[in-house]
Amino acid sequence: MKNATLNLRDLVILVADPSPYMCMLANSMLRGFGANKAMDARSSIDAIQILTEQKIDILLCDNLLPPHGGLKLTQAIRRNVNNPNRTVPILIMTSDTRESTIKSARDAGANMVVAKPMSPSSLYDRLSWIAFNPRNFVDAPTYFGPDRRFKIEGFPTGVGRRQGDNAIEVSEETGPTLAQDDIDNLFNSSRVG
Amino acid sequence: MSHMPNSNGAREFPVETDFQKKARRPGGVTRNQAVGDAQAQIETLKEDFNDWLKDGLDRLQSAIQLAETYPDNAMLVEDAFRSSCELRDIGTTMGYELVTFVANRLCEVLNAIRNGADYDKVLIRCHIDALQLARQDSYRNVSPDQVPDLCDGLRRAAEHSGRIGK
């Protein structure tokens, strides 16, 4: 994974952000990564229209995308059983990195969150993470999206999780914002086996 | 892993998207090369960025003037908030970390107003003045901790106003 290369050629990438400059900036980064098919949407309505008309390979979506917001858009994509893009990877871009916001993004069905302002390395790493860490999908009455459950893959020297161990719920955090590493940890929860 | 619904009615199934399949194809670019190439793309935008920054600040000031003129129109505060968000979200990427810092504080002020706080003209103008300073070319690549007086001044203004920073 660490030395893997990312091949974005001919992938259709939709960047949904109300700011034309932000779209241009994201597209510039993606071009630098080798992407050649990026498109823009300025609103959640535009994005839905594009998503119903054509197959998209990945969606980069601003958290505050008007008028509905990026998380509502994510939920709409995940909940629509007729949407051919229902399982499309969704990367939420946000400057609001409070833990509650990140958890909301995860619970809406986003694959990953990248903090704004973005750097090329932070964007590349999140795209790479999505590409090389596929997660099962969960279809539940209240949720459709990538598996959100944590998986402990074992401890060193053969010590494993005991059968009677229970998962614990960590109390809700409200105040401080998260660094990108902390955001990643909230998503680094796929059950691999 | 089960494809059958469990007792909660939840079903779990593997998905390999086209993105995952295609992005892992041979012939991709390494992280170092990709980041370097992306940085080079951004450098080409920097030539015109100061003009965009000036225009962005003009748009923000216009939005704020309208919001001050029609304080009961929530959409005008929303416009000002979004203009401020745009400066915040782009500044650091383009080498203007101080723009992001000040715009972020202004976003907090405007967000408080969106949520019902009183409109404090003086506090907002303090932030606009700070943004005018931060957009100067001489402040490019200057981080907030290199201008503690400016940052403390904004914090004190916010505390005085009672909006943020307490």
Image (spheres, rainbow, N blue to C red):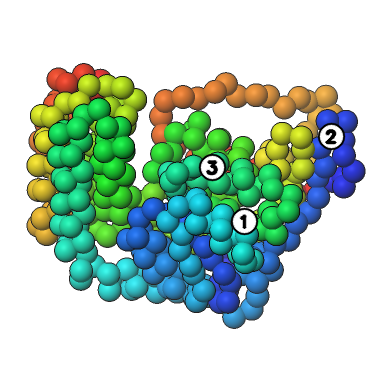
If the image is split into quadrants, where does the N terminus of chain A sit?
bottom right
Residue sitting at x 56%, y 77% = A9
Which picture quadrant has residue A142? top right
* Distance between the alpha carbons at the discs numbered 3 and 1: 13 Å
Which picture quadrant has residue A6? bottom right
Provide residue B141's location: percent of width, then percent of height. Answer: 20, 56
Tell me the chain of label 1: A
Tell me the chain of label 2: B
Question: Helix or strand or loop: what does disc 1 sit on?
Answer: loop
Q: Which mark is residue B9?
A: 2
Work out whether A67 lies above or below B52. above
* Distance between the alpha carbons at the discs numbered 1 and 2: 24 Å
Question: Helix or strand or loop: what does disc 2 sit on?
Answer: loop
* Residue A105 falls left or right of residue A119: right
Q: Which mark is residue A89?
A: 1
Question: How would you rate the neighbour count of disc 2 (Cα within 10 Å): few for under 14, some for 14-19, many for 20 or more?
Answer: few
Amino acid marked by disc 3: Leu
The answer to whether any part of residue B152 appears in the image is no
Work out whether A165 lies above or below A126. above
Is the Cβ of the residue at disc 1 closer than 8 Å to that at disc 2? Answer: no
Q: Nearer the viewer, residue A72 or A126?
A: A72
Q: Which residue is mark 3?
A: A71
